[in-house]
Image (tube, grey):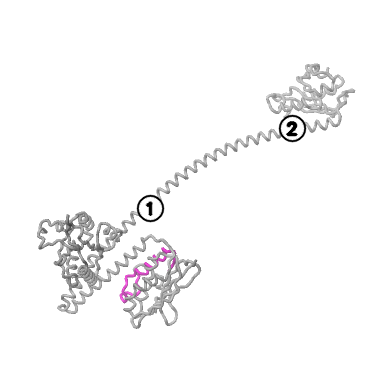
Amino acid sequence: MAPENTAALANPSSDLAAACRAVAEHSPLPMLAVEGPGLIVCYVNPAFGRLLAKPREQLVGHPFGDLLPQLPHGVTLLDRVFLTGEPASSADPHPESPDLASPIQSYIVWPLKAGGRTVGAILKVVDGAGLPERILAINEALLLGSLHQHELTDAAESVNARLMVEADEHKKVEALVRRTQAALVYRAGQLEAMVDERTSRLTAANNRMEDFVYSIAHDLRAPLRAMEGFSSLLLEEAGGTLNETCRGYAERIQKSARFMDALLIDLLAFSCTSQQRIELTSVNLGPVVESVVLRLKEDISEKRALLEAPGPWPVVLAHEATLAQVLFNLMANALKFSRSDRPPIVRLGTETRGEFLRVWVEDDGLGIPIAHQSQVFRLFTRLNGDRYAGAGIGLAIVQNGVERMGGRVGVESLPGEVQGTRFWCELRAVSKP
Amino acid sequence: MSELPTILLVEDSENDLLLMRSAFKKAGSVFPLREVRNGEEAIAYLKGEGPYQDRTAFPLPTVMLLDLNMPRLDGFDVLFWVRNQPLLKRLTIIILSASLHGDDVAHAFDLGANSFLVKPTNLEALAAMIRSLCDWIRINHFPPLLETREE
C-alpha cells in the first residue's frame, strides 16, 4: 500500500477508505491504528485482538506502549513515523531499543495524514508467533486481490463513465442523424419541386415550339402556295405571250417556291423527329426497308436507278417510324447524289458489329472528300451547292433520329473506281428468340 | 336529286380562293361553287339570312369545303355549330387545312367532319385533289338535305 492511499484512509467518506477498512477488518494479519503523538490506539482489527488474546474494547483508547510494553522498538518506530511522515519497518536498524520476546516479530508502519500533517499511523504485523507462512501468503493474495478488486471497480467505474459519455455522444449523433435526415427529406422535396417546375417549364417551351412550328407550317406555306400557284397560272395563261426572259423569271419564282416548300417540309420533319417521344421496341428491318423502297418507287424509276438490297434484314432495337424516316433519307440521299451520266446504283445491306447492327446505304456517286465528311450531318450543310436539289436537312434528321434511338451514324468513301459513298447507321441488335 | 349538288367553299384567304377557283376550273368541275369569306358568313349562308335568303342564287349546299384557320369563328366553330343544327345534319363537311397539326384530324372527326384534306402547295397537286373530289361527288349518293320523314 502506498502512502498516498493511507492518507485517503483518513477520509471515511472515500470509497477507498471504506475498502481499506474492509480489507483491514478481514485481514488475517494483525493491524492497528494509532492517533496523536500520544500514540493512542484508535483501531485494532480482529486479527490483532486474536494476537494479543484480548477483546477489542480493552485495546482501543490505550497508548500503544501500554498495550505492548515488550515492543519498545515499535514505539520508537511509531514516533519516527510521526516525526518524518515516512513509512518505516521493523527491519530498519534499531540498536538502541531491541524488542524483547514478543508475539510480534516484524511489522511495518505507515503514517496517516490529514491536511499534509501526520495525525496517526497504521501498524501492520507481517510476522509473529502463530502466524503461519500460509496465512501470510493468503494475506498478500487477499490484499492484492482487494487492490485488484478496487482497481477493477475503478476501471469498471471509468468504463461506466466512458459508456455514459458514449451514450450521450450516441444520443447527440442520433439527434444529428435525425436532423440530417429531416434536412435530406426537405432537400429531396425541394429538388422534386424544382424538377417538377423545370419539367413544366420545358413542357411549356415544347408547346411553344410546337405552336411555332405550326405557325411556320401554316403561315409560311400559305404565301408559298400563292407564289407557286400564281406563277404557275401566269406561265399557263400568259406563257405564250411572254418573252423568254420574262418566262424565265416566272419559272424561277415557281421553282424557288417549290424548293422552299420542300425545305419547310424537311424542317417540319426535323422538328418532329426532335420532339417526338421515342420508345424503342424490337423492329424487323425487312418490312421497314420494303416500305421505304415503295415510297421511293417513283424516284427510283425516274432515275432508272438500280437498287440492290438482298438482305438479310435482322431485328433491331428502334422506333419504327423514326427508323423508316432515317432509311428513307439515306436512300433518297443516295439517289439524289448520283452522277448524271449513268443510271445510279444504290446498295443497301447490313452487318453485325458486336452488340450493334450496322445498316449501310451505298451510292456510286461523286463521293465526299474526307475533309468534308464530318460536316455532312450538320443542319443546312450542302456540299454540292446548286447542282443538287436539297435543303441540307435530310442527314441532320438521320443523325438526330439514330442518336435518339441509342445508335450512331457515320460516312466513309468507297475505295477504288466505285468512288461512291457509304452512309451507315448502327442500332442495337436484338438477338432472335 | 336531279340538280347538281352545290359546293360551298369557306375560305378567308383571297389567294387561296383564287387558287381554288383555278383548281376547280382545271379539274373541269361542273358543280355550282359558292364562296363565303369567314365563319360568320358561312353560318349566315346556311341559315339563309340576309342576301342568302335567295335560295335560287344561294342554294343549300350538299358539300361544304371548310378552311380551319380563320379569324373569329374558325372552322371548328362552324363545324360545331352545323352539327348542332338538326336540319343540317346531312351536310357533307370536308375540312381543308393548310397543315396537319397535332390532334386537328381527330378533333375534326369528333366534331362530325366527313373528310380531312391538306391543301397541297403546288397548284398542279391542288387541281388533282379537286379533280378526285369532283369524281367522288359525282359517284356518291347524297341523301336529300332535309328530312322527309312521314309522321
A119 vs B44: above or below:
above
Q: Residue at x 83, y 31 (%)?
A: A136
Q: Residues within 10 Å of mark 2 (few under 14, many from 20)?
A: some
Question: Residue A393: percent from the left, percent from the top?
Answer: 34, 68
Residues rendered magenta in the picture: A381-409
Please indicate, yes or no, whether residue A408 appears anywhere in the rendered image. yes
Q: Secondary structure at mark 2?
A: helix
Three-letter code, disc 2: Leu
Q: Nearer the viewer, residue A232 or A150?
A: A232
> Residue A11: which quarter of the image?
top right
Both marks 2 and 1 on one chain: yes
A35 vs B91: above or below:
above
Q: Nearer the viewer, mark 2 or mark 1?
A: 1
Q: Give residue A199's mark.
A: 1
Q: Give residue A147's mark.
A: 2
Q: Secondary structure at mark 1?
A: helix
